Image (cartoon, rainbow, N blue to C red):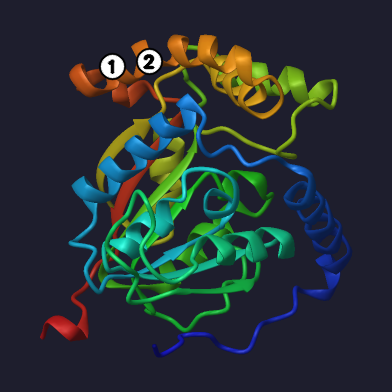
């Protein structure tokens, strides 16, 4: 497998201290945060992500895809693992060394119980920053960035990097917290942050319009706007807490999650109101591979 990596770039000297502190924070989160796989809300999340891939990316067989963090592969939906089992060529970066190590462990070769088709390509990964991606221009057919860029001050720079590494004609799905979530998740997160009970650090939210404008400024064409996780944020958090620390109560929270999963399957209109916006973009131009 040919690697599109350039030599890893050090962050600018003016921000090295802040970036080092942020790496340390996420390294700690990676080491102590529990695995969320198996929770009812995580299964709902995974179903949403697989739908996004099926509806908005080309066939996964041979698709070279970059994921801008590997949290899901270490702790959550394993969406890139699933894509690998469909024949995708999986690449990923994360700012956290422990998360990288756990994500790689999820890519053990061979079939698994839920994915009988074996990998033909493993995971090529590196500890890196989404604001300074260590890849050559036009390296990827697709980029998936769900819940990454809102954790950084320089969000615009992260989007520019996504655009830079995407091939002409390639597609990206960029997801951020929905500022207009009907269940008021951004307000709930702000309250948790104020009392230092939010485990994911600094986080911003965006309106659909603001996200679209940011993506267009980076030279990307918006082709679809949707969202995932039509569910109260507090219920998702409660379900994960019960799954991690009080399994008997997870049956109750799972029962509360199921109506939202049912609505998502049978009333597609609710998807636009999920708490994670998912905007699909295309980089203008035609890939040389198609000529």
**Residue tagged by mark 1?**
262
Q: Position of residue 59 (x, y in %)?
A: 18, 62
At numbered mark 2, what does the secondary structure look like: helix, strand or loop?
Answer: helix
Q: Quadrant of the N terminus?
A: bottom left
Residue 140 x, y percent position in the rendering: 36, 74
Query: Going by the image, does 40 lie left or right of 242?
Result: left
Residue marked by disc 2: 258
Q: Where does the image place residue 138, in percent across and percent down from the top left?
A: 37, 79
Return the residue found at the far left. 291
Identify the residue shown where x is 59% and y is 51%: 71
In the rendered view of the protein, which quadrant contains the C terminus? bottom left
* Quarter-of-image position of residue 262: top left
The residue sitting at 72% across, 61% down in the picture is: 98
Between residue 126 and residue 143, name the one nearer to us.
Answer: 126
The residues tagged by marks 1 and 2 sit, at their Cα atoms, a distance apart of 6 Å
Q: Is residue 274 above or below residue 79?
A: above
Labels 1 & 2 near each other (Cβ < 8 A): yes
Give the SS element for disc 1: helix
Left or right side of 32 for 68: left
Q: Is residue 72 visible?
A: yes
């Amino acid at each position: 497998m040919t690697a599109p990596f350039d030599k890893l770039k050090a962050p600018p000297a003016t921000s090295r201290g802040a970036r080092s502190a942020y790496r340390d924070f996420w390294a700690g989160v990676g080491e102590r945060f529990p695995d969320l796989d198996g929770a009812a809300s995580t299964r709902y999340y995974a179903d949403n992500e697989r739908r996004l891939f099926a509806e908005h990316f080309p066939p996964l067989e041979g698709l070279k895809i970059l994921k801008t963090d590997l949290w899901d592969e270490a702790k959550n939906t394993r969406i890139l693992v699933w894509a690998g089992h469909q024949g995708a060529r999986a690449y990923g970066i994360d700012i956290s060394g422990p998360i990288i190590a756990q994500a790689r462990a999820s890519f053990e070769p061979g079939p698994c119980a839920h994915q009988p088709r074996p990998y033909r390509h493993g995971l090529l990964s590196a500890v890196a920053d989404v604001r300074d991606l260590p890849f050559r221009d036009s390296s990827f057919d697709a980029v998936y960035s769900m819940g990454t860029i809102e954790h950084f001050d320089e969000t615009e720079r992260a989007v520019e990097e996504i655009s830079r590494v995407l091939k002409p004609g390639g597609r990206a799905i960029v997801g951020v917290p929905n500022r207009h979530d009907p269940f008021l998740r951004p307000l709930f997160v702000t309250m948790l942050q104020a009392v230092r009970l939010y485990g994911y650090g600094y986080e911003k939210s965006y309106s659909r319009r603001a996200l679209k404008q940011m993506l267009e400024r980076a030279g990307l064409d918006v082709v679809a706007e949707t969202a995932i996780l039509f569910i109260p944020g507090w219920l998702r958090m409660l379900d994960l807490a019960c799954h991690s620390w009080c399994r008997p109560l997870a049956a109750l929270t799972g029962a509360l999650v199921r109506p939202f999963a049912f609505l998502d399957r049978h009333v597609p209109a609710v998807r636009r109101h999920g708490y994670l916006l998912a905007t699909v973009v295309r980089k203008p131009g035609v890939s040389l591979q198609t000529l």
